[in-house]
Amino acid sequence: MPGARVRSKTSEGDAGYTFAFRHRKMPIPRTLTEKMDSRMRNSPLFPALILLLSLVTPARAQQAAAEPDAVQLYDIELILFARLGAAAANSEGWPEDPGVPDYSRAFAIQEALTPGALQLLPPGQRLLGAEAARLARSGRLEPLLHLAWRQPGLEPGRAGPVYLRSAETVDGALPRLEGTVTITRQRYLHADLDLLLRDHRFVPGAGSLFDKRPGYRFVEHRKMRSGELHYIDHPLAGALIKIEKYTPPEPPAPPQAEPAVPPSEVRTAPPPPSGG
């Protein structure tokens, strides 16, 4: 090659560059950036700076990963109903002791949404009023509970079950329907129902006018999407459930200030006396 860039020593002792062309060496002065880079590397603080950067960058990444996104809220509406007639109780074999749902981690629905609590929605915000009326008019189904509430969408392990009970009681104290529903959010929404229906059904030929079992267990799971209405069936009971993604309303626009009165229209002196 007629010329090549080679590294050499300058007269000042610093490493520099020269350009050799036909056996003639012409020194090329360093740029300001190269000199700063050389001085920084030779500084006794350079190893400490490298260590600090190696610690700060992973720490910031861990902090960003640990910062949770805003949790999406959902409005859940649920109708629970029982089937009327003795035939439903005799359609299947039922265990003598169905057990009871696990209430140890269940949340009660509160009036306001607070950490660890759920917000009860007023009847005016329910969307399934027409469906509840059709169930009542059917003559075959009896609505026992109609609720709507707002809760965060959490993954399994973080979402707790919601405690449910009907206003109607049996034996003077126990709720006719009692149990839990757990709403979790993964790729889809999931609803898990675990209910106990206490209902003394007439059982022909059983030696007694009433079946004295503790109740009938209703355990179901349903995978859902937001906005879908799902019907969950059972020989003795059933459920209608709908989950809607909650979108907070836009904050109101700040009030506009009244336009200032021009100085020429402002009275700064009392009016003149009336008369002569």
Image (cartoon, helix red, strand yellow):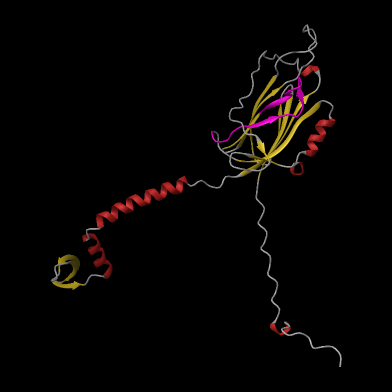
Residue lying at the far right in this picture: please name it.
275
The magenta-colored residue range is: 157-179
Q: Where does residue 263 sit, x and y in percent of width and height?
A: 69, 83
Answer whether residue 172 is magenta in the image: yes
Quarter of the rendering occupied by the N terminus: bottom left
**In terms of image quadrants, where is residue 35?**
bottom left
**In terms of image quadrants, where is residue 257?**
bottom right
Number of numbered discs overlaid on the protein picture = 0
Q: Where does residue 153 sit, x and y in percent of width and height?
A: 60, 40
Residue name at image x 72 percent, y 36 percent: 147
Q: Is residue 104 visible?
A: yes
In this picture, residue 118 sits left or right of residue 236: left
Answer whether residue 105 is magenta in the image: no
Asked if 39 appears above or below 272 in the picture, the reply is above
Q: Where does residue 97 sit, x and y in percent of width and height?
A: 66, 14
Quarter of the rendering occupied by the C terminus: bottom right
Residue nearest the observer in this picture, 157 or 245: 157
In this picture, residue 47 sits left or right of residue 221: left
In this picture, residue 104 sits left or right of residue 271: left
Residue name at image x 80 percent, y 27 percent: 141
Q: Where does residue 148 sit, x and y in percent of width and height?
A: 71, 38
Residue name at image x 62 percent, y 39 percent: 117
Q: Is residue 228 visible?
A: no
In this picture, residue 70 sits left or right of residue 92: left
Asked if 156 appears above or below 40 in the picture, the reply is above
